[in-house]
Image (tube, rainbow, N blue to C red):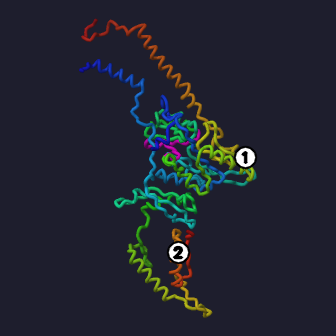
Amino acid sequence: MSQEILRIQKISGHAGSVPGEDTQRQYTVCKLIDTTTCIGCKACEVACMEWNDLPFGETVFGNTYQTMPETRWNYWNLILFNEHEREDGTLMWLMRKNQCMHCAEPGCLAACPADGAIVQYTNGIVDFQQANCIGCGYCITGCPFDIPKMNPKTNRVFKCTLCTDRVSEGLEPACIKSCPTGCLHFGSKVDMLDLAGKRAKQLREHSNFQNAGVYDPQGVGGTGVIYVLHDATKPEIYGGLPRDPHVPWTVKLWKGPLKWLGNVAMVGGLIGLFVHYLRFGPKAREDEDINPRGEKS
Amino acid sequence: MNPTRRDFLKLTTIGGAAAAVFGFDLKPAFAQLRTLKIARASETRSTCPYCAVGCGTIIYTIGDRAKNVTAQVVHVEGDPDHPTNRGTLCPKGSSLQQEIMNDRRLLKPLVRRPGGTEWQDISWDDAINEIAAQVKKTRDETFVEKDAAGRTVNRLESVAWIGGCTDTNEFNYLVVKSMRALGVVHLENQARV
């Protein structure tokens, strides 16, 4: 049923072909978050917790309206509240819904060594399969947005699933549905980019935001969650949104050249062993060796 | 076949090497999708009880309303066909499932007697009878037939009615009719449903 709709195009730590690669003509899904119309009501946070039946844990007060300092393994969707001082000295809220960005080239998936623990469906959703997770935490290193979080009790990593269960059945994600101001949108990537571009243009031309723009970082191949920002030239002011996110070079090196070098070394070692055996034969026994009967030879 | 220990070890090694080389995966699928938890749940339309906006909600309960199933609320979300909210809900509305399932939710009437500190159980019949008796007593004692200027007003100023936000038009019509019949002038309800 659902497997027919959602096939997999990328699998972490997997040798060989991927069943769904190049097999489907499917649109990529995308969330559009218009930070300019977010009022910070947190309906999306609550809707996420309700739909995914996540328990709410104890948290700390950080002198803002923000629910907690950062996302957790059981809190996947968090509005970041940022007080921003404009050039004329007045204050404004910059509120950003922070969750998994569902990158087209996910750093978590590249870093993951466990076969099938992280998959990317043909519609672009990046999903963690906790049953295959080995709890190494490399995905946390690989993510440029600091999103995957470890459950310390079970050593499994969790994050936003973009409501895979809903999307595969043709529904929108829970957070998108709840948003009362309509700052969240859901649809195909093409449509969302179009809508975001129009909104940014409107902000530039009819509001006082000359630098308004769309955040769809190409360093990770574009993301399945895009933002409209008041000031696209300074994404850092939105709670540390990276200007040009990349998969860490350590992960790239380790999963690219180092992996091949390691394989070559391993195979070379085996061949060397074999050649050594052919050339010199088995290790000659010393005179002091004891034969199976226990007598000196 | 009666393999020796040496043969057995050989076979195991060859078999293991073959499995490793040619690929042998016991896992049937790489991803097990979570199933939609409301796929065949019953949908019931309702109204959010919190504020005067009166957002439409859909309450999802397990089972198909068959006789032997006790419905259990599994999810609440906005009603996309409702003209007020068109599927959206605020954070309070989004958490309605917890309100419905809350173990501190009142499911029966309680009474606190004048001067009392404890809430006591009371049956619906007793509660309604007692309220009716109190209304009658209050009305008999405080009904205003004429105001200070001698004009006929026939009003009851000592009783007020406050409605809730899930009250429908029809319910409010009945409220106004019955309360006006008593002479109540302080009528208000939060509902704009």
Foreground: A117 or A152?
A117
SS label for mark 2: helix
Q: Position of residue A179 (x, y in %)?
A: 58, 55
Q: Is residue A161 magenta?
A: yes
Identify whether B3 is placed above or below A140: above
Relative side of A269 to A282, left or right: right
Local crowd at mark 2 within 10 Å, few (<14), some, or many (≥20)? some
Front position among marks 1 and 2: 2
The residue where tag 2 is placed is B172
Read off the magenta span. A144-164
Quadrant where the C terminus of chain B is found in the figure: bottom right
Identify whether B84 is placed above or below A104: below
The residue where tag 1 is placed is A211
Q: Position of residue A242 (x, y in %)?
A: 63, 41
Q: Quadrant of residue B101?
A: bottom left
Q: Position of residue B95 (x, y in %)?
A: 50, 58
Foreground: A67 or A269?
A269
The type of residue carrying mark 1 is: Asn
Foreground: A254 or B2?
B2
